[in-house]
Image (cartoon, grey):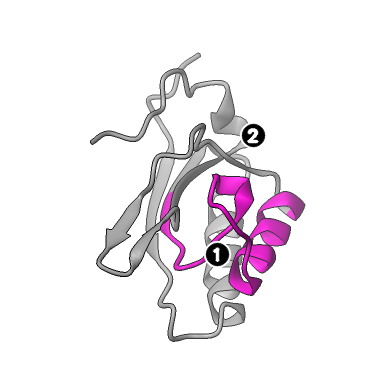
């Protein structure tokens, strides 16, 4: 499969801002890339068992619903922590792709 042309977005969602404010820019990205391959890497500042965290919070639930309704696939495949601090660890970072890009992903992993 030829993946020479694709769109990529790196997104940080501020935990201090309502998650609803971040949905509109995500919708804009999807509209701009409609029909093309897309990969999104995100510091979501949200937790969800969908991206292998131990719990799902409100922010995570809204993102889960948005991604499911827009056919975005979370490709995190294991529970390796993506965030660690003195307060603990969690999986608030994830990578997602649209259906056009999914077949091109072969060996995604979290590096140390």
Where does residue 34 sit, x and y in percent of width and height? Answer: 61, 48
Q: Which residue is mark 1?
A: 26
Where does residue 3 sit, x and y in percent of width and height? Answer: 43, 24
Q: Which residue is mark 2?
A: 99
Q: Are marks 2 and 1 in contact (CB under 8 Å)?
A: no
Q: Is residue 35 left or right of residue 5?
A: right
Where does residue 90 sit, x and y in percent of width and height? Answer: 43, 56
Q: Earlier in the sequence, mark 2 or mark 1?
A: 1
The label on residue 13 is: none
> Between 105 and 36, which is closer to the camera in this rendering?
105
Q: Is residue 60 left or right of residue 12?
A: right
Residue at 25% in and 67% down:
86
> Between 53 and 67, which is closer to the camera in this rendering?
53
SS class of the residue under badge 2? helix
Q: Is residue 28 left or right of residue 71?
A: left
Above/below status of 7 relative to 60: above
| Tally of numbered discs | 2
């Amino acid at each position: 499969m030829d993946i020479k042309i694709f769109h990529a977005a790196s997104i940080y969602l501020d935990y201090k801002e309502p998650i609803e404010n971040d949905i509109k820019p995500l919708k804009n990205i999807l509209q701009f890339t409609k029909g093309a391959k897309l990969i999104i890497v995100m510091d979501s500042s949200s937790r969800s068992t969908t991206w292998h965290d131990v719990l799902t919070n409100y922010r995570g639930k809204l993102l889960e619903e948005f991604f499911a309704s827009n056919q975005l696939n979370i490709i995190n495949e294991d529970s390796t922590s993506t965030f660690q601090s003195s307060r603990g660890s969690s999986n608030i970072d994830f990578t997602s792709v649209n259906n056009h890009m999914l077949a091109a992903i072969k060996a995604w992993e979290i590096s140390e």
